[in-house]
Amino acid sequence: MNAPRLIVTASPHVKDDDSTPRIMWTVAASLVPVIAASMFFFGISSLLVILAATLGALLTERFLGRPRSLRDGSAMITGLLLGLSLPPGIPLWMAALGGFFGIAFGKAIWGGLGQNGFNPALIGRAFLQTAFPVAITTWPTPGGDFFALKGDLFAFPFMSPSADVVTSATPLGLFKFEQQLTPIVDLVLGTTGGSVGETSAIVILLCGAFLAWKGYLNWRSPVSIILTVLVLGQLLHFINPARAAGGLFHVFSGGLMLGAVYMATDMVTVPTTNNGRWLFGVCVGAIVVIIRVYGGLPEGVMYAILIMNAFTPLINRATQPTVFGTVKLKEAK
Amino acid sequence: MAFFGFAHGVHPPEEKELTSALPIRRMPYPDELVLPLRQHAGKEAKLCVKVGDHVERGDPVGLADGYMSVPIHASAAGTVTAIDWWPHPDGTMAQSVHIKVEKYALQVPRPRLVPRWEGLTVEQVVKAVQDAGVVGLGGAAFPTHIKLAPPKDYTVHTLIVNGAECEPYLTSDHRTMVEYPERVHFGLRVMMQTLGVSKAVIGVERNKPDAIAALERTKPADLDVTILPLTVKYPQGAEKMLIKSVTGLEVPSGKLPVTVGVVVQNVGSLAAVAEVFDTGLPLLERIVTVTGHGLRRPANLIVPVGTKLRDLLAHCDGVTPDAAEVIIGGPMMGLAQSNLDAPVIKGTTGVVVLAAHETRGEIVYPCIHCGRCLDACPVFLNPSWLGDLARVKRYADMADYHLADCMLCGSCAYVCPSNIPLSQLFQASKVALRRTLQAAQQAGAA
């Protein structure tokens, strides 16, 4: 018998064939229908914004990230999600800058994949919201010519964009500042003003359901966020209908779907335990409703998730699983 | 009988069809046998032969060193040619007796008394089982006689027989149940009487319907024996998981099964005990599944203890060109071998030769805290958390998070998408923790 060259590894010697890059790339691929929907509503502009944000994120990962970290696909997700959370008319250089900031300060300085405390896409968006409050709240009206640009996309960096574009407030803004309610059907389908990807709730839900079915997404946090927003929103609506819109309105409006399905399920920045994910979701949902109803901003999903990201280590610590054989069971027999 | 089941666990590909239908064959004696004196949990056997001695098949070469030990017997007639340190399947070196097998010998053991088990006291049965060198044949090789005499302050109500065989690839227990069901029931009868229990349950995973049928067919009418089909899930055959599945009882953390009134024995051990009271022969050989996609001719073999892996694989026509890893035991908990001179010992359930494409990848990604390991861990640990702690060597904190309850089943590392070798980290942490505690004790004593 010939002497084979033997590998010696520790057990287990076999592994199921899922890998971190496969999870990441599948999540990224699952965003394709969402991107398609956004192009349906906002035309080429939305694609340009997403491309700019993704390019910013990928280039930053390439130069600031760990060697070969582009391959794991996580920077791709960050870029796509950031692009989807921006208004379709935002100047492209801002989108790219957001991608840079999200990866550089939301991920790379923490130590790369798996080490960051906060969702990098939301860090990028929070930066843009603070730096360019006007550009990021200028919401173009959906529809119109596919190739018509929805704003001064090619504005030169650090120049104020010329604002001669048809805009309309988001449903949340309409309600908060003008007491005008958008029909739920429009919200579900996405024929309303809003950011690139946060308009069509039904597409996002379907993509999320696909990921959950594949086992690449833990359904507990999105479900608990949506339920909390529904129940709490409806409760406040009963108390004061003029101030708080109904639960369904809250669930389907704004960035809630994108946030709940794609950002509150980012494995790195949400609790690891299932109980922790329930808790995380309930807290996010409550903060969203509180910001929307009582806060100065019309929308609160981004801050709600970022705030709860900060609590993730604490929730993890508090929700450690109960180990086998440490609870006294009652006699079975 | 109710089936309770256990939570979590994983479903690795079973790969049992390679050997599950192959009848057990006897392997010819190799030219040389190597018998390590350490083949069981507990104290290693005391050497009782010297170089040049002639031994008959069944003669002891090592004697039990106290109660927590069993003797080692020559598995073939021959001459002791050397006593030296030799590669052991656990990766270390162990003091071993080399026997040059006598050519053309009939390999008939010396005439011996077959104990009539009906008239024996508990102590006599325990002594007979110990003298025969019987250990748990499920892999851990815990001396069987110790489990036959549990501490007096517990009452045992059920004897559970482990026929789950949840490790992928392995079929030795499966074939034992199919081909020697009478022996299993006979061993069970002896054990039930010795333990004084009236109730026994044989747990068999559902993927072995022929084994379940064979056991049902030969079931003695006068004993309360239930054959319970179990869900096919790894690690169904882990002692605490099996007890939970069969009785619904959780063995308290850090305690032995006897605290909930249960004793667990492997089907192979039962057949070995039956052998002792049937023919009087000690444990000289065992059934080994030699299999894997890297092996030319998989088989279920009766292998003399001490057969070198090299001879065993050669008997199966050798390995294929893409063979990459030789494992003693199953692929989930087995030990990869670096030296094919290591022998088959009493606890060797199988030898699996993995092809290159089945082995783990080399790239390890950072933990993304996806939580899959939490959903896999059958004892509800948080492997992700423990893995983070192990990486920064916070062993004392790991102990607080129940590192001791980890049985190294490998479910977490099996599902980890980042390919983090979690069970290896935990194994190393357990060793490091033990060393720290020992050092602290010595410092305290001094």
Image: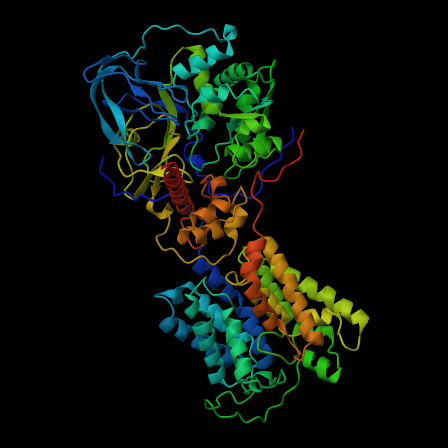
Q: Residue at x 53, y 65 (%)?
A: A30
Choose between B442 and A106: the one closer to the eye.
B442
Give the colour scheme shown. rainbow
Q: Quadrant of the N terminus of chain A?
A: top left
> Toward which corner of the image does residue A21 lie, by quadrant?
bottom left
Choose between A122 and B33: the one closer to the eye.
A122
Choose between A274 and B296: the one closer to the eye.
A274
Residue B104: give x, y in percent of width and height: 23, 14
Residue B151 visible in the snapshot: yes
Q: Quadrant of the C terminus of chain A?
A: top right
Residue B171: give x, y in percent of width and height: 44, 31
Judge whether B343 appears above or below B373 on screen.
Answer: above
Choose between B81 and A46: the one closer to the eye.
B81
Residue A152: give x, y in percent of width and height: 53, 90
B232 displayed left or right of A20? right
Residue B179 visible in the snapshot: no
Judge whether A18 appears above or below A127 on screen.
Answer: above
Residue B351: give x, y in percent of width and height: 35, 33
